[in-house]
Image: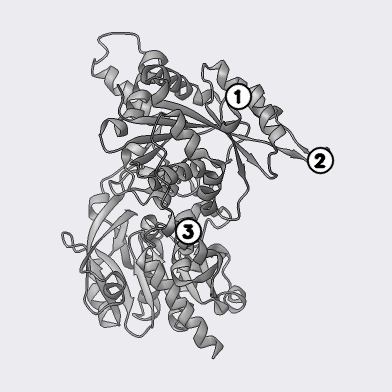
């Protein structure tokens, strides 16, 4: 008999309905009742992982402690649950097929013809159950990417059908997220798209146990009854998911709808413990009732797509609530930073964050933004490439290395203050080969970051190939650049600060990946506090 319960979240009618948020919200409610919960994402695309995907194509690439380059939904999972994810929490079709082909090459199938059923589906089922078999979780929620009816999703749907039969009725259930569109011309909500979506799911052998209906308008009892009747579910299992002002409202909305109660009932789990959400609601109250406002410029090259910097934007929400401040993030495209943009926009900011990224496009704009923040004492945070731009700017304008650059942008630069890491020089394949995952960093006492973290050694997540060039350490430090964090094993420079600036920090790692509702990242909290202090000085 299975000890771990499995919940599968599928989607229909349209993509981007918010399967990840529904999965994370249900997980939060179950966790708040005392259950050990984790969430995994199965992505139908054939890439091995999102590491080589353009941010415009897939949004940000989220990185876990163990170095997995994953879908951005894993960021939602961690932000809601405050539980670290891993390689096992994100699986792509590419990874599934690669594993099966490798097994075939090793002769593990004993000469059998390798087919989608049973070999691919067995591999998918094995990946789904890895987390459950660990013994660490009572409930595993698995989100299936894409929508029902997609060709690439079929092996996953078939795997779920098989697993539901193998696990037994009380040990698994399917939540189907669908759209109830509102036709303004008719003045009514339409259920037909949902009926077709559920029918498509049933044609694959799966009966949805719970319907979660995305809608712009409330569902009345008559419409819920119609959905229950046509989609073969109980009326209490028709859950309304109305548009919310913030994703962090969704757990409370799902609590009101009884999503957790019907889930526990169907899985034959105890539902007597009321969910403990006091910390969550305290955060929500501060987020919705700020006492002040600050404006921080996000200088990046992918700003057209908000998902490109999803974790940074969410980290500002967490840090803003902690400071009881509303953080207005002004996205500024680094490729188009001119003197006019600096005069009319950047000069009015309370803080400047130069974002991560790759490649040469937009680099000079980032350097201009760093220079303005440094010279005008505006609180500054540089992340990964942003930290490297701060080093280049300092090399050019303070150390008089006029053509200082990174060898990523200019391999022939006479002053490569940023250079490719030694271990990266012989690597040819791009996927999964960067410096990834959590690495230690030792902090220098009496620095901004040592006060921020309140400890001597930290563990932060990385994703980069290029690094501070140690050959220029002596000249840069002599000119006033402070190195306040280094990796204890390699000496890699992780953090820089400035002597004559109230709050200027560049970090080689990605602090945004570890910010959660329960634990806002201290670096973002301190940065927002510095921006608030700076805004007050401008008012006086």
Q: Nearer the viewer, mark 2 or mark 3?
A: 3
Residue 321: give x, y in percent of width and height.
47, 66
Label pair 1/2, CB-CB below 8 angstroms: no
* Quadrant occupied by the C terminus: bottom right
Secondary element type, mark 3? helix
Say if 76 sits above or below 196 in the image: below
Upstream in sequence: badge 3 or badge 1: 1
Residue plotted at (57% across, 79% down):
348
Residue 510: give x, y in percent of width and height.
36, 58
Horizontal side, residue 167 vs residue 250: left or right: left
Q: Would you name the residue on which mark 1 appears?
A: 198
Q: Would you name the residue on which mark 3 appears?
A: 281
**Of 276 and 287, which appears nearest the observer?**
276
Coloring basis for residues: one colour
Q: Would you name the residue on which mark 2 appears?
A: 187
Residue plotted at (43% across, 58% down):
278
Residue 25: give x, y in percent of width and height.
48, 45
Residue plotted at (31% across, 34% down):
131
Question: Is residue 391 in view?
Answer: no
Secondary element type, mark 1? helix
Residue plotted at (38% across, 58% down):
518
* Quadrant occupied by the N terminus: top left
Q: Quadrant of residue 166?
A: top left
Judged from this view, the residue extending furthest toward the left is 489
Residue 426: give x, y in percent of width and height.
25, 46
User: Mark 2 Cα within 10 Å, few/some/many (few <14, many 20+)?
Assistant: few
State how far apart marks 2 and 3 are (Cα): 35 Å
Q: How many marks?
A: 3
């Amino acid at each position: 008999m299975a000890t771990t319960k499995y919940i599968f979240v599928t989607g229909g009618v349209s993509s981007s309905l918010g399967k990840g948020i529904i999965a994370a919200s249900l997980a939060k409610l179950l966790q708040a009742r005392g259950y050990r919960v984790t969430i995994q994402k199965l992505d139908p695309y054939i890439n091995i992982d999102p590491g080589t995907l353009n941010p415009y194509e897939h949004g940000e690439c989220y990185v876990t402690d163990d170095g997995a380059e994953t879908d951005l939904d894993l960021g939602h999972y961690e932000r809601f649950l405050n539980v670290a994810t891993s390689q096992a929490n994100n699986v792509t079709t590419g990874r599934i097929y690669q594993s099966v082909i490798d097994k075939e090459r090793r002769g593990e199938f004993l000469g059998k013809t390798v087919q989608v059923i049973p070999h691919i589906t067995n591999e998918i089922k094995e990946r789904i159950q890895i987390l459950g078999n660990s013994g660490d979780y009572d409930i595993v929620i698995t989100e299936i990417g894409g929508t029902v009816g997609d060709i690439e999703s079929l092996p996953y749907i078939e795997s779920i059908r098989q697993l539901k039969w193998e696990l037994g009725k009380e040990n698994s259930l399917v939540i189907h997220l669908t759209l109830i569109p509102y036709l303004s011309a008719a003045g009514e909500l339409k259920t037909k798209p949902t009926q077709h979506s559920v029918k498509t799911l049933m044609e694959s052998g799966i009966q949805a146990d719970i319907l979660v209906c995305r809608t712009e308008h409330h569902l009345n009892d008559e419409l819920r009854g119609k959905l229950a009747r046509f989609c073969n579910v109980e009326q209490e299992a028709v859950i309304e998911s109305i548009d919310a002002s913030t994703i962090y409202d969704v757990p409370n909305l799902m609590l009101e709808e009884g999503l957790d109660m019907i889930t526990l009932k169907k899985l034959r789990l105890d539902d007597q413990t009321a969910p403990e959400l006091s910390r969550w609601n305290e955060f929500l109250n501060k987020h919705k009732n700020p006492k002040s406002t600050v404006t921080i410029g996000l200088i990046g090259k992918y700003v057209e797509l908000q998902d490109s910097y999803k974790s940074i934007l969410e980290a500002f929400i967490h840090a803003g609530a902690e400071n009881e401040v509303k953080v207005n993030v002004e996205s500024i495209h680094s490729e188009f930073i001119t003197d006019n943009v600096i005069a009319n926009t950047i000069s009015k900011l309370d803080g400047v964050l130069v974002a991560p990224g790759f490649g040469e496009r937009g680099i000079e704009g980032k350097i201009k933004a760093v220079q303005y923040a440094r010279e005008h004492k505006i609180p500054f945070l540089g992340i990964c490439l942003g930290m490297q731009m701060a080093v280049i700017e300092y090399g050019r304008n303070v150390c008089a290395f006029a053509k200082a650059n990174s060898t990523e942008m200019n391999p022939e630069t006479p002053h490569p203050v940023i250079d490719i890491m030694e271990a990266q020089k012989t690597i040819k394949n791009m996927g999964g080969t960067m410096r990834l995952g959590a690495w230690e960093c030792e902090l220098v006492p009496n620095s901004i970051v040592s006060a921020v973290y309140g400890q001597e050694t930290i563990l932060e997540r990385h994703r980069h190939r290029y690094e501070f060039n140690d050959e220029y350490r002596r000249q840069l430090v002599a000119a006033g650049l402070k190195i306040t964090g280094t990796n204890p094993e390699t000496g890699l420079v992780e953090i820089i600060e400035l002597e004559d600036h109230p709050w200027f920090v560049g970090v080689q790692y990605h602090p945004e990946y570890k910010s959660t509702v329960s634990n806002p990242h201290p670096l973002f909290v301190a940065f927002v506090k510095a921006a608030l202090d700076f805004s007050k000085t401008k008012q006086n």
